[in-house]
Image: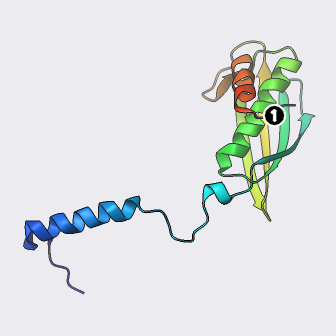
Amino acid sequence: MRVAPLCLFPSSTLAGVFAALLVAGCQPAADGPTLQDAPPASYDGIETRLLDDDLVNFRAQMTGVATRADLDAYARCAAAQYTLIRGYSFARHVRTSITEEGGVWAADAVYTISPDLPRGLQTLEAEIVAADCAEQGIPTV
């Protein structure tokens, strides 16, 4: 199929096509599911396992997840609160694996906890993160 370059269309035609595309992009999807139709997120619990003195595994489960970030935030909130419970101030994210089966989402996250700011890029100050989680209504351990 041969396509004519845009420069061959009259400017009035191109402007009309562009305007139609803009308007079409603003229209709501017809009969499609929306985020409002989705069930609210349900925080279904967190299992915490101490792997070593400063290494902790969090297994979090949710239903009604809008994005993977929702589940990641749930695990991060658990890590922040657990860090405070243990009397530490900081945590560093090691890894998170997220799976979904039949609408049930599960995160398997590992964090190190420490009294001092650890080296690494994915660190969190437990007190600040736990307060933010409370503001957002995300439960912790």
Query: Which residue is pictured at 71% across the width and 42% down the height?
Result: 72
Quadrant that contains the C terminus? top right
Look at 80% across and 65% down and name the residue there: 102
Residue furthest to the bottom in view is 1
Instruction: Judge whether 82 appears above or below 20 on screen.
Output: above
Q: Give the residue pinned by disc 1.
A: 139
Q: Residues within 10 Å of mark 1 (few under 14, many from 20)?
A: some
SS assignment at label 1 = loop
Residue 34 lies in quadrant: bottom right
State left or right for residue 32 relative to residue 72: left
Q: Amino acid at mark 1?
A: Pro
Residue drawn at x 69%, y 19% is 128
Residue sitting nearer the eye, 41 or 88:
41
Q: Residue 38 at what x, y percent from top left? A: 69, 58
Whole-percent x, y for residue 105 in the image: 78, 54
The one of 123 and 139 positioned closer to us in this rendering: 139
The reply, left or right, for residue 11 in relation to residue 29 is left
Residue 1 position, x and y percent, is 25, 87
* Percent coordinates x, y for residue 133 in the rendering: 73, 29
Write down the quadrant of residue 26 in the picture: bottom left
